[in-house]
Amino acid sequence: MFTVAFSVIAQPVFAVTEKEIQAKKQEKKEVTQQRASLQQKIAEKERLVNSLQAEQADIEADIKQLDEAVAQTNQNIRDKQAEIETTREEIRILEEKIAEVKQRIELRNELLTKRVRSLQVGGGVVSYLDVLLGAKSMSDFLDRASAVSTLFEADKAILKAHQEDKVLKEQQEVQMETTLQELEQKLVDLEQLEASLKAQIAEKDRIMEQLAEKEEQVHEELYEIEDEEALLRSQEAVLDKLIKRMIEQKKREEEEARKRGQTPKVTDGTFMRPAVGPVTSNYGARWGTTHFGIDIGKRGSDVPIVAAAEGVVFRSYYSSSYGNVVFISHYLNDQVWTTVYAHMENRLVSEGQSVSKGQKLGYMGNTGRSFGAHLHFELHKGPWNASKSNAIDPRKYINF
Protein backbone atom coordinates (compact mmCIF):
# COMPACT_ATOMS: atom_id res chain seq x y z
CA MET A 1 0.00 0.00 0.00
CA PHE A 2 1.29 3.45 -0.88
CA THR A 3 0.21 7.05 -0.32
CA VAL A 4 -0.22 9.34 -3.30
CA ALA A 5 1.14 12.80 -2.59
CA PHE A 6 -0.46 15.67 -4.54
CA SER A 7 1.50 18.88 -4.84
CA VAL A 8 1.04 22.22 -6.57
CA ILE A 9 3.30 22.25 -9.58
CA ALA A 10 4.52 25.53 -11.05
CA GLN A 11 3.36 26.01 -14.63
CA PRO A 12 6.19 25.89 -17.16
CA VAL A 13 7.36 29.10 -18.76
CA PHE A 14 6.78 28.87 -22.51
CA ALA A 15 9.46 30.25 -24.76
CA VAL A 16 8.87 32.90 -27.41
CA THR A 17 8.23 31.19 -30.73
CA GLU A 18 8.72 32.42 -34.27
CA LYS A 19 4.98 31.98 -34.76
CA GLU A 20 4.27 34.38 -31.89
CA ILE A 21 6.73 36.91 -33.32
CA GLN A 22 5.12 36.67 -36.76
CA ALA A 23 1.67 37.02 -35.17
CA LYS A 24 2.84 40.15 -33.38
CA LYS A 25 4.33 41.49 -36.62
CA GLN A 26 1.01 40.83 -38.34
CA GLU A 27 -0.74 42.69 -35.53
CA LYS A 28 1.63 45.62 -36.02
CA LYS A 29 1.03 45.45 -39.79
CA GLU A 30 -2.73 45.66 -39.23
CA VAL A 31 -2.26 48.65 -36.92
CA THR A 32 -0.01 50.29 -39.53
CA GLN A 33 -2.66 49.70 -42.21
CA GLN A 34 -5.31 51.17 -39.93
CA ARG A 35 -3.06 54.20 -39.38
CA ALA A 36 -2.55 54.58 -43.13
CA SER A 37 -6.31 54.44 -43.62
CA LEU A 38 -6.85 57.04 -40.90
CA GLN A 39 -4.12 59.25 -42.37
CA GLN A 40 -5.94 59.06 -45.69
CA LYS A 41 -9.16 60.04 -43.93
CA ILE A 42 -7.34 62.92 -42.21
CA ALA A 43 -6.08 64.11 -45.59
CA GLU A 44 -9.60 63.88 -46.99
CA LYS A 45 -10.99 65.84 -44.04
CA GLU A 46 -8.28 68.46 -44.43
CA ARG A 47 -9.15 68.77 -48.12
CA LEU A 48 -12.78 69.13 -47.09
CA VAL A 49 -11.82 71.83 -44.59
CA ASN A 50 -9.89 73.64 -47.32
CA SER A 51 -12.89 73.27 -49.63
CA LEU A 52 -15.15 74.64 -46.91
CA GLN A 53 -12.77 77.54 -46.39
CA ALA A 54 -12.87 78.25 -50.14
CA GLU A 55 -16.63 77.94 -50.00
CA GLN A 56 -16.57 80.22 -47.01
CA ALA A 57 -14.74 82.84 -49.09
CA ASP A 58 -17.47 82.62 -51.73
CA ILE A 59 -20.15 82.69 -49.07
CA GLU A 60 -18.47 85.69 -47.44
CA ALA A 61 -18.87 87.51 -50.78
CA ASP A 62 -22.54 86.53 -50.75
CA ILE A 63 -22.79 87.64 -47.14
CA LYS A 64 -21.18 90.95 -48.08
CA GLN A 65 -23.78 91.42 -50.83
CA LEU A 66 -26.50 90.53 -48.33
CA ASP A 67 -25.07 93.00 -45.83
CA GLU A 68 -25.00 95.68 -48.51
CA ALA A 69 -28.55 94.76 -49.53
CA VAL A 70 -29.66 94.92 -45.90
CA ALA A 71 -27.98 98.31 -45.51
CA GLN A 72 -29.63 99.57 -48.72
CA THR A 73 -32.97 98.20 -47.63
CA ASN A 74 -32.61 99.90 -44.27
CA GLN A 75 -31.77 103.16 -46.07
CA ASN A 76 -34.75 102.69 -48.36
CA ILE A 77 -36.93 102.13 -45.32
CA ARG A 78 -35.58 105.29 -43.72
CA ASP A 79 -36.17 107.23 -46.95
CA LYS A 80 -39.65 105.80 -47.26
CA GLN A 81 -40.41 106.64 -43.65
CA ALA A 82 -39.20 110.21 -44.31
CA GLU A 83 -41.41 110.37 -47.42
CA ILE A 84 -44.34 109.10 -45.39
CA GLU A 85 -43.74 111.75 -42.74
CA THR A 86 -43.48 114.46 -45.44
CA THR A 87 -46.68 113.21 -47.05
CA ARG A 88 -48.44 113.18 -43.72
CA GLU A 89 -47.27 116.73 -43.14
CA GLU A 90 -48.52 117.70 -46.60
CA ILE A 91 -51.87 116.09 -45.79
CA ARG A 92 -52.01 117.99 -42.51
CA ILE A 93 -51.31 121.30 -44.31
CA LEU A 94 -53.91 120.48 -46.98
CA GLU A 95 -56.43 119.67 -44.29
CA GLU A 96 -55.74 123.05 -42.68
CA LYS A 97 -56.07 124.86 -46.01
CA ILE A 98 -59.27 123.02 -46.85
CA ALA A 99 -60.59 123.91 -43.43
CA GLU A 100 -59.75 127.60 -44.03
CA VAL A 101 -61.42 127.53 -47.44
CA LYS A 102 -64.47 125.83 -45.98
CA GLN A 103 -64.63 128.48 -43.29
CA ARG A 104 -64.44 131.31 -45.85
CA ILE A 105 -67.13 129.67 -47.97
CA GLU A 106 -69.33 129.24 -44.95
CA LEU A 107 -68.85 132.90 -43.93
CA ARG A 108 -69.75 134.12 -47.44
CA ASN A 109 -72.72 131.81 -47.50
CA GLU A 110 -73.91 133.44 -44.31
CA LEU A 111 -73.26 136.91 -45.73
CA LEU A 112 -75.05 136.17 -48.97
CA THR A 113 -77.92 134.56 -47.09
CA LYS A 114 -78.32 137.66 -44.94
CA ARG A 115 -78.38 139.95 -47.97
CA VAL A 116 -80.98 137.82 -49.68
CA ARG A 117 -83.14 137.88 -46.55
CA SER A 118 -82.78 141.68 -46.21
CA LEU A 119 -83.91 142.13 -49.79
CA GLN A 120 -86.88 139.84 -49.16
CA VAL A 121 -87.85 141.87 -46.09
CA GLY A 122 -87.43 145.20 -48.00
CA GLY A 123 -89.89 144.17 -50.66
CA GLY A 124 -87.81 142.98 -53.44
CA VAL A 125 -84.64 143.74 -55.27
CA VAL A 126 -83.75 147.43 -55.70
CA SER A 127 -81.88 148.07 -58.94
CA TYR A 128 -78.77 150.20 -59.07
CA LEU A 129 -80.58 152.53 -61.59
CA ASP A 130 -83.37 153.30 -59.10
CA VAL A 131 -80.76 154.27 -56.58
CA LEU A 132 -79.12 156.65 -59.01
CA LEU A 133 -82.40 158.23 -60.22
CA GLY A 134 -83.48 158.89 -56.71
CA ALA A 135 -80.64 161.43 -56.25
CA LYS A 136 -81.80 164.93 -55.17
CA SER A 137 -78.81 166.83 -56.40
CA MET A 138 -75.70 166.37 -58.48
CA SER A 139 -73.63 165.96 -55.42
CA ASP A 140 -76.05 163.34 -54.13
CA PHE A 141 -75.99 161.65 -57.52
CA LEU A 142 -72.20 161.42 -57.49
CA ASP A 143 -72.24 160.04 -53.95
CA ARG A 144 -74.88 157.54 -54.95
CA ALA A 145 -72.94 156.54 -58.07
CA SER A 146 -69.81 156.02 -56.03
CA ALA A 147 -71.75 153.96 -53.48
CA VAL A 148 -73.43 151.90 -56.17
CA SER A 149 -70.09 151.27 -57.85
CA THR A 150 -68.58 150.24 -54.54
CA LEU A 151 -71.46 147.89 -53.77
CA PHE A 152 -71.36 146.41 -57.22
CA GLU A 153 -67.63 145.76 -57.06
CA ALA A 154 -68.01 144.35 -53.57
CA ASP A 155 -70.74 141.98 -54.66
CA LYS A 156 -68.74 141.04 -57.69
CA ALA A 157 -65.60 140.42 -55.58
CA ILE A 158 -67.57 138.36 -53.08
CA LEU A 159 -69.03 136.16 -55.78
CA LYS A 160 -65.67 135.77 -57.50
CA ALA A 161 -63.88 134.89 -54.29
CA HIS A 162 -66.70 132.56 -53.40
CA GLN A 163 -66.41 130.77 -56.71
CA GLU A 164 -62.61 130.61 -56.50
CA ASP A 165 -62.74 129.15 -53.01
CA LYS A 166 -65.14 126.48 -54.17
CA VAL A 167 -62.79 125.56 -57.01
CA LEU A 168 -59.78 125.69 -54.65
CA LYS A 169 -61.60 123.47 -52.18
CA GLU A 170 -62.31 120.90 -54.88
CA GLN A 171 -58.70 121.00 -56.09
CA GLN A 172 -57.32 120.64 -52.58
CA GLU A 173 -59.66 117.77 -51.85
CA VAL A 174 -58.55 116.02 -55.03
CA GLN A 175 -54.91 116.69 -54.13
CA MET A 176 -55.44 115.36 -50.63
CA GLU A 177 -57.13 112.23 -52.01
CA THR A 178 -54.16 111.69 -54.34
CA THR A 179 -51.74 112.31 -51.48
CA LEU A 180 -53.63 109.86 -49.29
CA GLN A 181 -53.40 107.24 -52.02
CA GLU A 182 -49.67 107.92 -52.32
CA LEU A 183 -49.39 107.55 -48.55
CA GLU A 184 -51.19 104.23 -48.65
CA GLN A 185 -48.87 103.03 -51.44
CA LYS A 186 -45.84 104.20 -49.51
CA LEU A 187 -47.06 102.31 -46.46
CA VAL A 188 -47.44 99.21 -48.63
CA ASP A 189 -43.96 99.78 -50.03
CA LEU A 190 -42.65 100.14 -46.50
CA GLU A 191 -44.19 96.82 -45.47
CA GLN A 192 -42.62 95.15 -48.50
CA LEU A 193 -39.24 96.68 -47.73
CA GLU A 194 -39.48 95.50 -44.12
CA ALA A 195 -40.48 92.00 -45.31
CA SER A 196 -37.55 92.02 -47.77
CA LEU A 197 -35.23 93.11 -44.99
CA LYS A 198 -36.48 90.33 -42.75
CA ALA A 199 -35.98 87.78 -45.55
CA GLN A 200 -32.46 89.06 -46.25
CA ILE A 201 -31.50 88.84 -42.59
CA ALA A 202 -33.00 85.33 -42.35
CA GLU A 203 -31.05 84.23 -45.44
CA LYS A 204 -27.82 85.55 -43.98
CA ASP A 205 -28.51 83.80 -40.66
CA ARG A 206 -29.25 80.57 -42.53
CA ILE A 207 -26.04 80.73 -44.55
CA MET A 208 -23.97 81.56 -41.47
CA GLU A 209 -25.57 78.78 -39.44
CA GLN A 210 -25.14 76.26 -42.25
CA LEU A 211 -21.52 77.22 -42.75
CA ALA A 212 -20.76 77.11 -39.04
CA GLU A 213 -22.49 73.73 -38.69
CA LYS A 214 -20.56 72.21 -41.60
CA GLU A 215 -17.23 73.52 -40.38
CA GLU A 216 -17.88 72.42 -36.80
CA GLN A 217 -18.89 68.93 -37.95
CA VAL A 218 -15.81 68.52 -40.13
CA HIS A 219 -13.52 69.78 -37.36
CA GLU A 220 -15.10 67.37 -34.85
CA GLU A 221 -14.67 64.45 -37.24
CA LEU A 222 -11.09 65.53 -37.95
CA TYR A 223 -10.29 65.75 -34.22
CA GLU A 224 -11.77 62.27 -33.63
CA ILE A 225 -9.76 60.75 -36.48
CA GLU A 226 -6.58 62.51 -35.32
CA ASP A 227 -7.12 61.17 -31.79
CA GLU A 228 -7.63 57.67 -33.15
CA GLU A 229 -4.56 57.98 -35.39
CA ALA A 230 -2.48 59.18 -32.41
CA LEU A 231 -3.70 56.18 -30.40
CA LEU A 232 -2.76 53.77 -33.21
CA ARG A 233 0.60 55.52 -33.61
CA SER A 234 1.33 54.96 -29.92
CA GLN A 235 0.12 51.36 -30.19
CA GLU A 236 2.32 50.80 -33.25
CA ALA A 237 5.36 52.14 -31.37
CA VAL A 238 4.62 49.84 -28.41
CA LEU A 239 4.18 46.85 -30.72
CA ASP A 240 7.46 47.68 -32.43
CA LYS A 241 9.24 47.71 -29.07
CA LEU A 242 7.47 44.51 -28.05
CA ILE A 243 8.51 42.74 -31.29
CA LYS A 244 12.11 43.80 -30.77
CA ARG A 245 11.93 42.59 -27.18
CA MET A 246 10.40 39.27 -28.29
CA ILE A 247 13.11 38.80 -30.92
CA GLU A 248 15.80 39.53 -28.33
CA GLN A 249 14.13 37.19 -25.86
CA LYS A 250 13.91 34.47 -28.53
CA LYS A 251 17.60 34.87 -29.27
CA ARG A 252 18.44 34.59 -25.57
CA GLU A 253 16.21 31.55 -25.20
CA GLU A 254 17.74 29.93 -28.27
CA GLU A 255 21.19 30.56 -26.85
CA GLU A 256 20.16 29.15 -23.46
CA ALA A 257 18.48 26.19 -25.16
CA ARG A 258 21.62 25.58 -27.18
CA LYS A 259 23.59 25.49 -23.95
CA ARG A 260 21.22 23.30 -21.92
CA GLY A 261 19.14 21.43 -24.52
CA GLN A 262 15.92 22.24 -26.26
CA THR A 263 12.28 21.46 -25.56
CA PRO A 264 11.02 19.37 -28.48
CA LYS A 265 8.51 20.98 -30.77
CA VAL A 266 4.93 19.76 -30.69
CA THR A 267 4.42 17.88 -33.94
CA ASP A 268 1.47 16.44 -35.81
CA GLY A 269 0.56 12.81 -35.44
CA THR A 270 -0.53 10.75 -32.47
CA PHE A 271 2.77 11.02 -30.59
CA MET A 272 5.75 13.40 -30.56
CA ARG A 273 9.35 13.11 -29.42
CA PRO A 274 9.52 13.21 -25.60
CA ALA A 275 12.97 14.85 -25.59
CA VAL A 276 15.61 16.35 -27.85
CA GLY A 277 18.81 14.38 -28.26
CA PRO A 278 20.37 11.46 -30.04
CA VAL A 279 18.98 7.94 -29.73
CA THR A 280 21.68 5.99 -27.85
CA SER A 281 19.85 2.66 -27.62
CA ASN A 282 16.94 1.32 -29.70
CA TYR A 283 14.06 -0.97 -28.90
CA GLY A 284 14.84 -4.71 -29.03
CA ALA A 285 17.44 -7.23 -27.96
CA ARG A 286 20.25 -5.92 -25.78
CA TRP A 287 22.79 -7.65 -23.51
CA GLY A 288 20.98 -10.98 -23.75
CA THR A 289 17.60 -9.57 -22.86
CA THR A 290 14.95 -7.31 -24.39
CA HIS A 291 15.17 -3.51 -24.20
CA PHE A 292 11.48 -2.47 -24.11
CA GLY A 293 12.07 1.16 -24.98
CA ILE A 294 14.34 3.78 -26.58
CA ASP A 295 17.12 5.68 -24.82
CA ILE A 296 17.70 9.35 -25.72
CA GLY A 297 21.05 10.82 -24.74
CA LYS A 298 21.51 14.11 -22.93
CA ARG A 299 23.01 17.07 -24.76
CA GLY A 300 23.09 20.23 -22.64
CA SER A 301 22.84 21.09 -18.99
CA ASP A 302 19.05 21.08 -18.71
CA VAL A 303 17.12 18.94 -21.20
CA PRO A 304 13.33 19.08 -20.78
CA ILE A 305 11.20 15.95 -21.04
CA VAL A 306 7.64 16.38 -22.32
CA ALA A 307 4.49 14.29 -22.65
CA ALA A 308 4.41 12.45 -26.00
CA ALA A 309 0.60 12.89 -26.11
CA GLU A 310 -2.18 14.21 -23.93
CA GLY A 311 -3.31 11.95 -21.13
CA VAL A 312 -3.51 11.38 -17.37
CA VAL A 313 -0.59 10.67 -15.05
CA PHE A 314 -1.41 7.50 -13.14
CA ARG A 315 2.02 7.05 -11.53
CA SER A 316 4.70 9.58 -10.60
CA TYR A 317 7.25 8.33 -8.11
CA TYR A 318 10.82 7.28 -7.46
CA SER A 319 11.61 3.67 -8.45
CA SER A 320 14.76 1.80 -7.46
CA SER A 321 15.18 0.67 -11.05
CA TYR A 322 13.57 3.51 -13.09
CA GLY A 323 14.61 6.29 -10.71
CA ASN A 324 12.28 9.29 -11.06
CA VAL A 325 9.64 7.91 -13.40
CA VAL A 326 6.28 9.06 -14.79
CA PHE A 327 3.58 6.77 -16.24
CA ILE A 328 0.89 8.34 -18.43
CA SER A 329 -2.27 6.68 -19.72
CA HIS A 330 -3.64 7.88 -23.06
CA TYR A 331 -6.93 7.19 -24.81
CA LEU A 332 -6.44 8.05 -28.47
CA ASN A 333 -8.58 7.00 -31.44
CA ASP A 334 -10.50 4.44 -29.35
CA GLN A 335 -7.23 2.89 -28.17
CA VAL A 336 -5.58 2.86 -24.75
CA TRP A 337 -1.87 3.68 -24.80
CA THR A 338 0.72 3.95 -22.06
CA THR A 339 3.98 5.94 -22.07
CA VAL A 340 6.83 5.65 -19.55
CA TYR A 341 9.52 8.30 -18.84
CA ALA A 342 12.35 6.95 -16.65
CA HIS A 343 15.65 8.06 -15.01
CA MET A 344 14.43 11.69 -14.85
CA GLU A 345 16.28 14.24 -12.73
CA ASN A 346 13.00 15.44 -11.24
CA ARG A 347 9.23 15.22 -11.73
CA LEU A 348 6.99 18.24 -12.34
CA VAL A 349 3.67 16.37 -12.50
CA SER A 350 1.77 14.33 -9.96
CA GLU A 351 -0.54 11.33 -10.02
CA GLY A 352 -4.06 12.05 -11.27
CA GLN A 353 -2.93 15.16 -13.16
CA SER A 354 -4.04 15.70 -16.76
CA VAL A 355 -1.27 16.72 -19.12
CA SER A 356 -1.28 18.07 -22.65
CA LYS A 357 0.82 17.04 -25.58
CA GLY A 358 4.23 18.70 -25.23
CA GLN A 359 3.74 19.62 -21.55
CA LYS A 360 6.95 19.50 -19.52
CA LEU A 361 7.18 16.53 -17.14
CA GLY A 362 10.66 17.22 -15.76
CA TYR A 363 14.31 17.23 -16.84
CA MET A 364 16.54 14.47 -18.17
CA GLY A 365 18.60 12.84 -15.45
CA ASN A 366 20.58 9.81 -14.28
CA THR A 367 18.49 8.47 -11.41
CA GLY A 368 17.88 4.79 -10.57
CA ARG A 369 19.75 2.01 -12.39
CA SER A 370 21.25 4.25 -15.05
CA PHE A 371 24.71 4.52 -16.51
CA GLY A 372 24.85 8.11 -17.72
CA ALA A 373 22.22 10.79 -18.06
CA HIS A 374 19.50 9.79 -20.53
CA LEU A 375 15.75 9.25 -20.96
CA HIS A 376 14.43 5.72 -21.10
CA PHE A 377 11.13 6.02 -23.02
CA GLU A 378 8.58 3.20 -23.43
CA LEU A 379 5.41 3.02 -25.55
CA HIS A 380 2.75 0.37 -24.76
CA LYS A 381 -0.27 -0.32 -26.96
CA GLY A 382 -2.68 -0.99 -24.13
CA PRO A 383 -2.20 -0.88 -20.34
CA TRP A 384 1.26 -1.28 -18.84
CA ASN A 385 2.01 -4.64 -17.20
CA ALA A 386 5.01 -6.12 -15.47
CA SER A 387 5.78 -8.51 -18.32
CA LYS A 388 5.63 -5.56 -20.75
CA SER A 389 3.73 -7.69 -23.21
CA ASN A 390 2.10 -4.56 -24.73
CA ALA A 391 5.39 -2.75 -25.36
CA ILE A 392 6.10 -1.75 -28.99
CA ASP A 393 8.90 0.00 -30.82
CA PRO A 394 8.30 3.78 -30.48
CA ARG A 395 9.96 4.36 -33.88
CA LYS A 396 6.81 2.91 -35.51
CA TYR A 397 4.86 5.99 -34.36
CA ILE A 398 7.48 8.65 -33.64
CA ASN A 399 10.13 10.07 -35.95
CA PHE A 400 13.34 10.12 -33.99
Image (spheres, grey):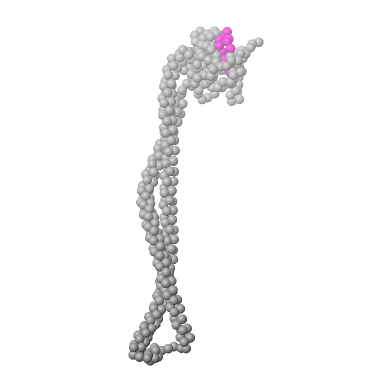
Residue at the spot 56% in from the left edge and 13% down from the top edge: 325
What kind of secondary structure does the magenta stretch mostly adopt? Answer: strand
Q: Quadrant of residue 230?
A: top left
Q: Which residues are magenta?
A: 317-328
* Quarter location, residue 195: bottom left
Q: Position of residue 175 (x, y in %)?
A: 40, 71
Report the front residue among 232 and 34. 232
Q: Quadrant of the N terminus?
A: top right
Q: Position of residue 47 (x, y in %)?
A: 38, 43
- Can the viewer see residue 167 in this picture? no
- In which quarter of the view is residue 388 placed? top right
User: Where is residue 156 shown, x and y percent of the image?
Assistant: 38, 82
Image: 248 above or below 78: above
Give above or below for 292 relative to 164: above
* Residue 322, magenta (yes or no): yes
Residue in the image at 51% along x and 13% along y:
364
Left or right, 12 with respect to 215, comes to right
Place of residue 94 in the rendered image (x, y in percent of width and height, measured from the top left): 41, 69
Whether residue 49 is visible here, answered yes or no, is yes
Closer-to-camera residue (125/56): 125
